[in-house]
Image (cartoon, rainbow, N blue to C red):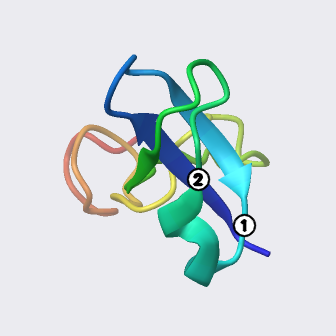
């Protein structure tokens, strides 16, 4: 089952819930019991192994640019 993120339209509580896609219209807020709406989740992943703690999804260069052969690379 997928993990979805929800927002309560009454108390603004944001929470996650494992549920089937068909059941996402029937999710209630755990704080106040009001029906909640599904919101898009955002995430960030980091890569380990090269020592720089870089993020997935960008660049690939050795310095401030995405090129691997510019003058700022050492």
Q: CA distance from mark 2 to mark 1?
A: 9 Å
Whether residue 58 is situated above or below residue 16 in the rendered picture: below
Q: Using a 10 Å C-alpha cutoff, classify the residue at mark 2 as few (fewer than 14 neighbours), some (14 to 19) or many (20 or more).
A: some
Q: Position of residue 11 (x, y in %)?
A: 39, 17
Q: Nearer the viewer, residue 5 or 53?
A: 5
Q: Secondary structure at mark 2?
A: loop
Quadrant where the N terminus is found in the figure? bottom right
Q: Using a 10 Å C-alpha cutoff, classify the residue at mark 1 as few (fewer than 14 neighbours), some (14 to 19) or many (20 or more).
A: some
Q: Which residue is mark 1?
A: 19
Whether residue 1 is situated above or below residue 10 in the rendered picture: below
For image coordinates 75% across by 45% down, the residue present is: 48
Residue 38 marker? none
For image coordinates 21% across by 55% down, the residue present is: 70
Q: Position of residue 14 (x, y in %)?
A: 50, 29
Which of the two labelled residues, at mark 2 and mark 1, occupies the earlier sequence position? 1
Whether residue 23 is situated above or below residue 28 in the rendered picture: below
Task: For the residues labelled 2 and 1, say whether their Cβ atoms are less than 8 Å apart.
Answer: yes
Q: Secondary structure at mark 1?
A: loop
Q: Position of residue 13 (x, y in %)?
A: 48, 22
Q: Position of residue 57 (x, y in %)?
A: 41, 62
| Residue 29 shown left or right of residue 12 in the figure | right
For image coordinates 49% across by 45% down, the residue present is: 6
Quadrant where the C terminus is found in the figure? top left
Q: Looking at this rendering, what residue extends furthest in the bottom direction?
A: 22
For image coordinates 34% across by 24% down, the residue present is: 10
Q: Nearer the viewer, residue 72 or 43?
A: 43
| Residue 69 shown left or right of residue 48 in the figure | left
Front position among marks 2 and 1: 2
Q: Which residue is mark 2?
A: 27
Whether residue 1 is situated above or below residue 59 in the rendered picture: below
């Amino acid at each position: 089952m997928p993990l979805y993120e929800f927002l309560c339209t009454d108390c603004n509580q944001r929470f996650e819930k494992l549920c089937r896609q068909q059941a996402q219209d029937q999710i209630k807020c755990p704080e106040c019991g009001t029906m909640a709406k599904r919101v898009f989740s955002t995430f960030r992943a980091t890569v380990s192994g090269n020592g720089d703690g870089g993020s997935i999804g960008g660049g690939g260069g050795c310095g401030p640019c995405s090129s691997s052969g510019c003058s700022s690379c050492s």
